[in-house]
Amino acid sequence: MTPRHHPDHALVIDFAAGTLGPGRNLVLSSHLGVCPACREEARLAESIGGALLGNLPPVAMQVDALARALARIERPPAAPAPDVPSPVDWIQTPPEVAAAARRRRWAAPGVWVAPVIRGPGAERTYLLRVAAGMAVPRHSHRGAELVCVLKGAYHDGARVHARGDFAENDEAIDHRPRATAESECICLIAADRPLVARDWVGKLFQPFVRI
Amino acid sequence: MDAIRTDFHARPPAVSFAAGRLRAFGMSARDGASTGPNFSGMIVAIAERGDREAFAALFGHFAPRVKSYLMRLGARPEAAEELAQEALLTVWRRAVAFDPTRAAASTWIFTIARNLRIDLARREKRPPPSEDLSMGNAPAPAPDVVLAAGEDESRIGAAIATLSVEQAQVVRLAFFSDKPHSEIAAELGLPLGTVKSRLRLAMSRLRLLLGDIR
């Protein structure tokens, strides 16, 4: 099933341009992996990037640069890092996302979090798991947050976000997403800044959710 | 700002030490009107027979531009030099993965440089994510949205040159400025929504011009 909720065009362009930063880049990568439409959008933007690159005024390399490169191609490349396959019921994700699940820790009843990338600055990228039918404590956001659903689905008000779907939440959003009854829901989230708990349950668990 | 327009009307300078070789790669089989060097053919020559002259020609053209790109995004000259080296070595090592029917040489090299930069930011080795998505086992997109086989940057450049000055400016900033759109908007003295809509319009126009080539 192809995703129904997509990133803004500007975000796809930033992804293609490589200016998103590592955490947001991972969230976009995960969505693009299962979304042919956005992938095509990114390919178009990449070809624009290629044309811009090809026409940049060159900055001279050092005089021995080519000689050094030719010397280096004689040597065999370092062995690539082993692939970490995503769990079978997740969408395919970059290896470090699946690897991060090993760092999971309890955050609230039915909820665990697992840090994927810290920084830059206050930015945090993490996995969030919510058990089937359960909700995340009500919260709002400072700054923006990008979300890609890796497994299962969640209700956010009237909308359902399923595997592969993308969401962007900002300060205006004050919500309490709930996993659908069928299965646990696991999301990859890149947040500019920590969440703000909006009810006593959230405030109670806030210290545990520090990623 | 006009640089973006004039750049595309200038041919890339030939690299003197490989000039003869460049002529050999010169004419693209598909498009007799194109007189630029056939960079895709060079990558294929590396893949098929480890062609060092082709590598030298690619290096001569792209390494200084990759360095330029990285410096625009804030890299120091030494770091940019090193990453440009790494990018061109990756071209050598992964040449067999290059599919000239799916991407222009410049696009492929751009994604390699971009991914190396992101990897460096992570200070952690992992396979370039988007390259695998766009060049690897991903299902082939519908024919009507595939860029034409062997599509070269001059064609794309010509399309970019048809953008309005305002649109070209935001496209250029999106690629060569490491700032969020909100900061770009502030610098241009425009509302964020205007910057985003200009980008969207620019991309729609480019898709229209480039999306139905074949």
Image: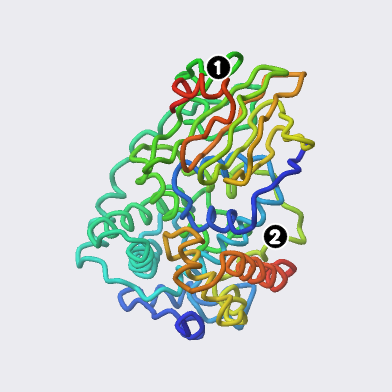
Picture layout, residue B18 above or below residue B44: below
Residue A1 picture quarter: top right
The x and y percentages for residue B112 are: 45, 53
In the picture provided, is B81 more to the left or to the right than B117? Answer: left
Chain hosting mark 2: B
Which residue has dot 1 on it? A108
Q: Nearer the viewer, residue A56 or A24?
A: A24
Dot 2 crowding, Cα within 10 Å, few <14, some 14–19, many 20+: many
Q: Nearer the viewer, residue B82 or A94?
A: A94
In the picture provided, is A102 more to the left or to the right than A130? Answer: left
In the picture provided, is A39 more to the left or to the right than B182? Answer: right
In the picture provided, is A102 more to the left or to the right than B208? Answer: left
Indicate which label's residue lies in the foreground, 2 or 1: 1
Chain hosting mark 1: A
Pointer 2 and pointer 1 on the same chain: no
- Count of marks, rendered view: 2
Q: Nearer the viewer, residue B77 or B24?
A: B77
The x and y percentages for residue B56 are: 34, 64
Q: Amino acid at mark 1?
A: Ala
Which residue has dot 2 on it? B146
Q: Amino acid at mark 2?
A: Val
Residue drawn at point x = 30 percent, y = 59 percent? B75
Picture layout, residue A126 above or below residue B81: above
The x and y percentages for residue A161 are: 72, 35
User: Could you say whether the residue bearing mark 2 is in a helix, strand or loop?
Assistant: loop
The x and y percentages for residue A114 are: 48, 24
User: Could you say whether the residue bearing mark 1 is in a helix, strand or loop?
Assistant: strand
Dot 1 crowding, Cα within 10 Å, few <14, some 14–19, many 20+: some
Residue drawn at point x = 55 percent, y = 17 percent? A108
Quadrant that contains the C terminus of chain B: bottom right
